Image (cartoon, rainbow, N blue to C red):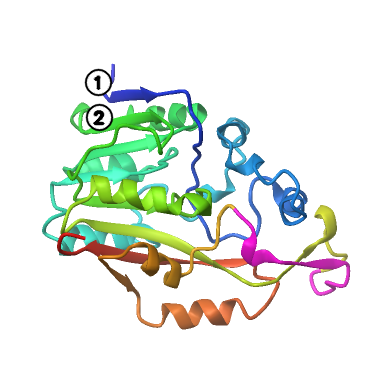
Amino acid sequence: MSRMHVTKVFPVVFGGSLLGVAYKSWGGGHEERAKVYDGIETDERLSINWWDDKWSLRQTSWRRGEATDPQKTFDGNIEVVRKLLETEPVVKNGKAFVPLCGDSKVVPYLAAKGMSVVCVEGSENALKRLREEIATHPQAVQDRITVIEGDFFTASLPEADIDFIYDRGSLVAIDPARRGEYFAAIQKVSKPGTVCYLEGIIRSPVYSGPARGKPPPSNTDYAPWVKIPNIVCGPPHNTPPSDVKELYKGWVFRMEEGAMDALIEGLQDTKNSHAHYRSALKRTGDA
């Protein structure tokens, strides 16, 4: 029997989990995309019920792109996380925070590295899968994981106690209007020297998508497609580096050299709805 710590914070006002950002279509497909672009049912994708239904139906395309076996996989996002764990002394054997964690296998991975891990999730179905995953690990790993079940914005979070934050799909998932609240929570759990791994996305201003979910007749004929004001769509919401740097005042922001140019080049084709980037932030001073 796992002794994994669980804290419940209900009722849930808002929640959800996204664990990937680099794909053209999401669980709801282009039909639901168009509803958002048309200004219809814009709140549906910000409700806990919508996310929980997606987890229940296993329509979790956002899960693609994250390492499924972090102990053996050396590419993608986990490579960046490994480098941060190795090069930032404050992170080693410290405390980690994973907001909107879903069933991420990085949670037990960090615990297996010796870190105490606190994670927050609002979807019961996602947490069921997370618990099943955690239960496959040694008891010592399970005992280093604390799961807070409920709304991120109302949860009782650890104060000034976190050394490392793993944000893969959390900032991009929340309502952009609540980013100030989100950053306030990040400030609350962090302290000078805290390191954050963050994945964001850049949306193309306009995306050529199929009209109401109808695919084009061939891979090269996009005549029946419609042009969508893609930059305002989400989730995942547009989070360009400039917005992240503006939000995370008092944090040093880093991206791989040449990454920004590659993103811009990739989005020149309007058939690419968005591209993701990996970054690292470090809190400085008393910000």
Kindly identify which residue carries mark 1.
Answer: 3
Residue in front for this viewpoint, 256 or 51: 51
Residue in front for this viewpoint, 101 or 221: 101
Evaluate if marks 2 and 1 touch, with contact meaning CB atoms under 8 Å apart. yes
Quarter holding the C terminus is bottom left
Segment tinted magenta in the rendering: 219-234
Judged from the image, the secondary structure of the residue bearing numbered disc 1 is loop
Kindly identify which residue carries mark 2.
Answer: 142
Amino acid type of the residue tagged 1 in the rendering: Arg
Q: Quadrant of residue 78?
A: bottom left
Determine the residue positioned at 77% across, 55% down: 38
The image shows residue 194 at horizontal and vertical percentages of 20, 56
Residue in front for this viewpoint, 281 or 265: 281
Distance from disc 2 to disc 1, alpha carbons, whole Å, reads 7 Å
| Residue 243 in sight | yes
Quarter holding the N terminus is top left
